[in-house]
Image (cartoon, grey):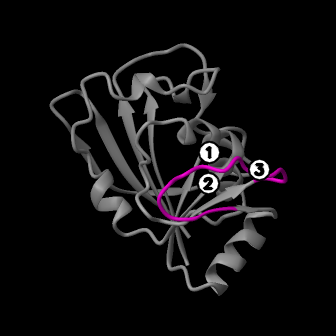
Amino acid sequence: MKASVFVGASLDGFIARPNGEFDFLSPSGDIPHGYDEFIATVDALVMGRNTFGVVNEMAEWPYGNKPVIVLTTRPLPSAPRLGTIEPMEGTPHQVAERLAARGFQHIYVDGGITVQRFLNAGLIDRLIVTRVPVLIGAGIPLFGPTHHDIALKHIATRTYATGLVQSEYELAR
């Protein structure tokens, strides 16, 4: 099973403000930047409880009818959303094994802590990071401490008229 990250971050490396808001990610509107094409390749999403809490409050559900696996030990609030929302516990390896056994081929890993845990476990295959031309000074970092160096292979970098710069990497194995 393949695991990918598709994330936006401020130029100073934050994916959200300290309160979890990410309003700075689209300063010039929601111009197309490959998200629709990316999400079409994904079978399911895996995210942490905090990310789910923020996304669940959004007016528009960004994942269509894709299954969303929320890593949590607590019950989830019921939400009338498309697709299925399923709580799951376990290490990144346990979660990946369960999802692979269910036939998922490509998962989208989202949320700061969840991305960091899957990276440290060696389970991320592809990273697509879109840098937004803004400095916010503080917030939730895209990457936290790692247990070891994580070597990446650069695949492509794309620029957009609004100043977005998107870089794609594969993990060097």
- For the residues labelled 1 and 3, say whether their Cβ atoms are less than 8 Å apart: no
Residue 19: image x %, image y %?
Answer: 64, 21
Q: Which residue position is annotated with label 2?
A: 150
In which quadrant of the rendered image does the C terminus lie? Answer: bottom right
Residue at left offset 57%, top offset 86%:
103
- The overriding secondary structure of the stretch rendered in magenta is loop
Nearer the observer: mark 1 or 3; the answer is 1
The image shows residue 33, relative to residue 24, as above or below, that is below
Which residues fall within the magenta stretch? 72-86
Nearer the observer: mark 1 or 2; the answer is 1
Q: Which residue position is annotated with label 1?
A: 52
Is 74 displayed left or right of 65 in the figure?
Answer: right
The amino acid pointed to by label 2 is Ile
Between marks 1 and 2, how big is the CA–CA gap? Answer: 26 Å
Instruction: Give the SS element for disc 3.
Output: loop
Residue 88 sits in quarter:
bottom right
The amino acid pointed to by label 1 is Phe
Instruction: Give the SS element for disc 2.
Output: loop
Q: Which mark is first along the chain, 2 or 1?
A: 1
